[in-house]
Image (cartoon, grey):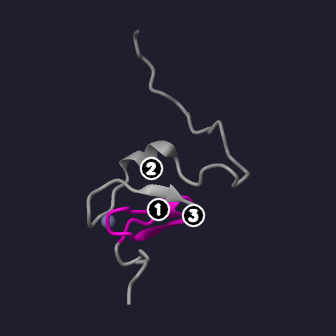
Amino acid sequence: MPVGHGSRCFAVRKNRPMSEQQDIIDKDLLKVLACPDCKVSVRLEGQKLICDKCGRRYPIRDGIPIMLMDEAEQPGKP
Ligand SMILES: [Zn+2]
């Protein structure tokens, strides 16, 4: 199909979830996230992202996963 005209304003977003009952981050985003240390995928648990390998828990703020080792909680840390 011919695309002659430049696309104009497509900025209107369809869904704007007002409730926080749904997943706090996108499932597709979750799939590509990985522990920066172990390079393995993480899983969502509550409001945190868990790395099963090292056990670090990465916080999610405003829907943005904070995949930083400095920000992660380490269970079992002395
Ligand atoms: Zn890890």
Q: CA distance from mark 2 to mark 3?
A: 13 Å
CB at disc 2 and ligand 1 closer than 8 Å: no
Instruction: Say which mark, if any, is on residue 49.
Output: 1
Q: Which of the two labelled residues, at mark 2 and mark 3, occupies the earlier sequence position?
A: 2
Q: Which residue is mark 2?
A: 30
Name the kind of residue labelled 3 in the image: Gln
Q: Give the residues drawn in magenta, as a range.
A: 48-68
User: CB under 8 Å between callouts 1 and 3?
Assistant: no
Q: Residue furthest top?
A: 1
User: CB under 8 Å between callouts 2 and 1?
Assistant: yes
Q: Which residue is mark 3?
A: 47
Where's residue 1, x and y in %?
41, 9
| Other-residue count near label 3 (Cα within 10 Å), few / some / many at <14 / 14–19 / ≥20 | some
Pick the residue in front: 9 or 57.
57
CB at disc 3 and ligand 1 closer than 8 Å: no
Q: Quadrant of ligand 1?
A: bottom left
- SS type, badge 1: strand
- SS type, badge 3: loop
Name the kind of residue labelled 1 in the image: Leu
Dividing the image into 4 quarters, which one contains the C terminus? bottom left
Q: Is residue 75 above or below residue 48?
A: below
Where's residue 11, x and y in %?
57, 39
From the viewer's perspective, is 19 left or right of 36?
right
Q: CA distance from mark 1 to mark 3?
A: 7 Å
- SS type, badge 2: helix
**Picture residue at 26% right of the left edge, 58% below the top:** 39
Pick the residue in front: 48 or 26.
48
Q: Is residue 13 above or below residue 68?
A: above
Residue 33: within the magenta?
no
**Picture residue at 46% right of the left edge, 62% below the top:** 49
Q: CA distance from mark 2 to mark 1?
A: 9 Å
| Other-residue count near label 2 (Cα within 10 Å), few / some / many at <14 / 14–19 / ≥20 | some
